[in-house]
Image (spheres, rainbow, N blue to C red):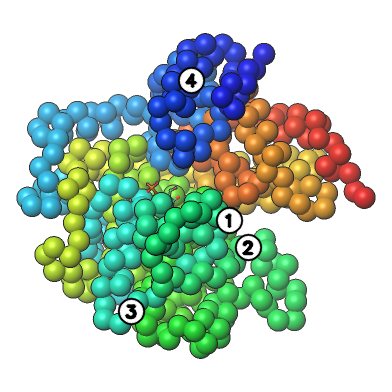
């Protein structure tokens, strides 16, 4: 029987897990957003075990981080080999071969606007997603008179003050904090599902790029004072929301017209998660700055921005840096991650398995009214729940997530009423099928428990 303790649900058995959670809630910040009482013991690939011996399939990958899965021997070897040489040098002050190897590879695989050759690109290394965004924002504003940034509602870019200024995902993330940097204008994100409805109106109010030009630029912020537009190619924390098809090409044109830099936040969607190195590659445009982190180090903390040398080349010594940024062990893990994605053909695998998963869930959706939106690319798939009147069902979503956990599947919510399917990229078809069996059963159980939500008035 499942148990509730400290506000979290626990599977059976859970004695050891409950003891850890009891100590955790007394010791660690309550600002974390845990959902259920999973306490990890160890993992292998896309399978994990908790400290009470329960087994799970992992559809969360540590929030879309573990690109190559848990404990991949080649990642472990790379980490060990570098750690035996040296763990830290401080690449702010000294030089580091692992950074050169990683930087060279990143500029090969990352398309950047007006950069025809890898040699036209430059890299900055940091430790996390939010630091990559901070670096991008600072770099974009490092131009005379360019003081404004445009971001999108639903966008999540991190929790440090600069990144928070462009984040507009959930009010709780900003609430009570004074002095969040200003100069940021948020506009609606043209989600594909929303836009299909909007396009049917005589005035296409889903055309956000037109809104930016006609309202933001013409009536509020002069175009030549806007430093950058920052956007996720697929909104992550905001609900795994895909953009409408014409959005990025129009956005690129607008940026070119006013000399605005297009920053693409690929922290969650990048590093092969969608079946291409970067999700923006589906959009047919090239950004000016790409932010990456999460999957880059297969779980080792590392972030980076990649941009044109004409943009980054303006920074002078001291303009930006970080003690741990591009740590050699983290770079070794990232180098091994990229090698594995290439040698194991993971981009193709992710594309094929993503198609299979979407097809299967699309069939399942036909008999399950709780699923009101289902979309994704590769292994970044969102499932959104709603009631008969189209109302978002957050509590319902939480119950599905909890039911999955009880039945041995690790998942995470996103947005107000969606959940994400974001397993390690190397998950096998067999494990994916088993995980989907658990997910579909969980949805069916929770639907049955709340049949009243789907009755039409
Ligand atoms: C798109 C996006 N940007 C930025 C971040 C922040 O990354 P980090 O938590 O490593 O600071 C996240 C984290 O979820 C993210 O999904």
Are the two marked residues, 2 and 1, in contact with CB atoms closer than 8 angstroms? yes
Mark 3 Cα-neighbour bin, 10 Å: few <14, some 14–19, many ≥20: some
| Residue 297, visible in the rendered structure | yes
Identify the element where label 2 is drawn.
helix
Identify the element where label 3 is drawn.
loop
Identify the element where label 4 is drawn.
helix
| Residue underneath mark 3 | 146
| Residue underneath mark 1 | 241
Tell me if the residue at label 1 has its CB under 8 Å from ligand 1.
Answer: no
Residue 369 percent coordinates (x, y): 79, 44
Above or below, 101 relative to 224: above
Mark 1 Cα-neighbour bin, 10 Å: few <14, some 14–19, many ≥20: many
Q: How much space separates mark 4 and mark 3, taking CA atoms?
A: 49 Å
Are the two marked residues, 3 and 2, in contact with CB atoms closer than 8 angstroms? no
Image position of 434 (left or right of 386): left
Q: How much space separates mark 3 and mark 1, taking CA atoms?
A: 29 Å
Marking on residue 192:
2
Sequence-wise first label, 2 or 4: 4
| Residue underneath mark 4 | 22
Sequence-wise first label, 2 or 1: 2
Sequence-wise first label, 4 or 3: 4
Residue 123 percent coordinates (x, y): 23, 59
Sequence-wise first label, 3 or 1: 3
Picture quarter with the N terminus: top right
| Residue drawn at point x = 69 percent, y = 30 percent | 442
Q: In front here: 282 or 265?
A: 265
Q: How much space separates mark 4 and mark 1, taking CA atoms?
A: 36 Å
Q: How much space separates mark 2 and mark 1, taking CA atoms?
A: 7 Å
Q: How much space separates mark 2 and mark 4, taking CA atoms?
A: 43 Å
């Amino acid at each position: 029987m499942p148990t509730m303790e400290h506000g979290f649900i626990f599977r059976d058995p859970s004695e050891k897990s409950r003891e850890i959670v009891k100590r955790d809630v007394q010791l660690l910040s309550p600002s974390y957003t845990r959902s259920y009482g999973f306490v990890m013991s160890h993992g292998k690939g896309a399978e994990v075990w908790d400290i009470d011996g329960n087994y799970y399939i992992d559809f969360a990958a540590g929030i879309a981080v573990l690109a190559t899965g848990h404990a991949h021997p080649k990642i472990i070897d790379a980490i060990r080999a570098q750690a035996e040489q040296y763990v830290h040098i401080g690449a702010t002050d000294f030089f580091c071969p692992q950074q050169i190897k990683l930087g060279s590879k990143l500029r090969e695989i990352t398309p950047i606007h007006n950069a025809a050759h890898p040699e036209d690109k430059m890299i900055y290394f940091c430790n996390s997603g939010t630091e990559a965004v901070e670096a991008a924002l600072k770099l974009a504003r490092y131009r005379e008179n360019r003081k404004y940034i445009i971001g999108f509602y639903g966008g999540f870019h991190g929790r440090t003050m600069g990144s928070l200024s462009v984040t507009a995902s959930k009010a709780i993330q900003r609430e009570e904090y004074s002095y969040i940097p200003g100069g940021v204008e948020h506009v609606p994100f043209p989600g594909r599902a929303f836009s299909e409805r909007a396009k049917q109106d005589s005035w296409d109010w889903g055309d956000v790029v037109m809104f930016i030009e006609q309202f933001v630029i013409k009536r509020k912020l002069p175009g030549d004072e806007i430093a950058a537009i920052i956007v996720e190619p697929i909104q992550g924390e905001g609900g795994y929301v895909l953009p409408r098809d014409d959005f990025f090409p129009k956005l690129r044109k607008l940026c070119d017209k006013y000399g605005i830099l297009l920053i693409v936040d690929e922290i969650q969607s990048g590093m092969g998660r969608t079946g291409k190195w970067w999700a923006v590659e589906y959009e047919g445009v090239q950004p000016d700055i790409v932010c990456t982190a999460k999957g880059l180090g297969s779980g080792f903390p590392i972030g980076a921005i990649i941009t044109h040398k004409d943009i980054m080349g303006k920074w002078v010594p001291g303009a930006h840096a970080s003690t741990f940024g591009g740590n050699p062990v983290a770079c070794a893990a990232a180098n091994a991650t990229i090698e594995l994605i290439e040698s194991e053909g993971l981009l193709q695998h992710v594309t094929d398995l993503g198609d299979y998963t979407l097809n299967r869930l699309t069939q399942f959706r036909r008999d399950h009214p709780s699923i009101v939106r289902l979309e994704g690319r590769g292994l970044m798939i969102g499932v959104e729940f709603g009631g008969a009147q189209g109302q978002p069902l957050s509590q319902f979503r939480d119950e599905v997530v909890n039911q999955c956990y009880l039945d041995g599947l690790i998942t995470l919510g996103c947005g107000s009423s969606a959940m994400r399917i974001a397993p390690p990229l190397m998950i096998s078809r067999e494990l994916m099928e088993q995980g989907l069996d658990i997910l579909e059963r969980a949805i069916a159980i929770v639907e049955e428990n709340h049949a009243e939500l789907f009755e039409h008035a």
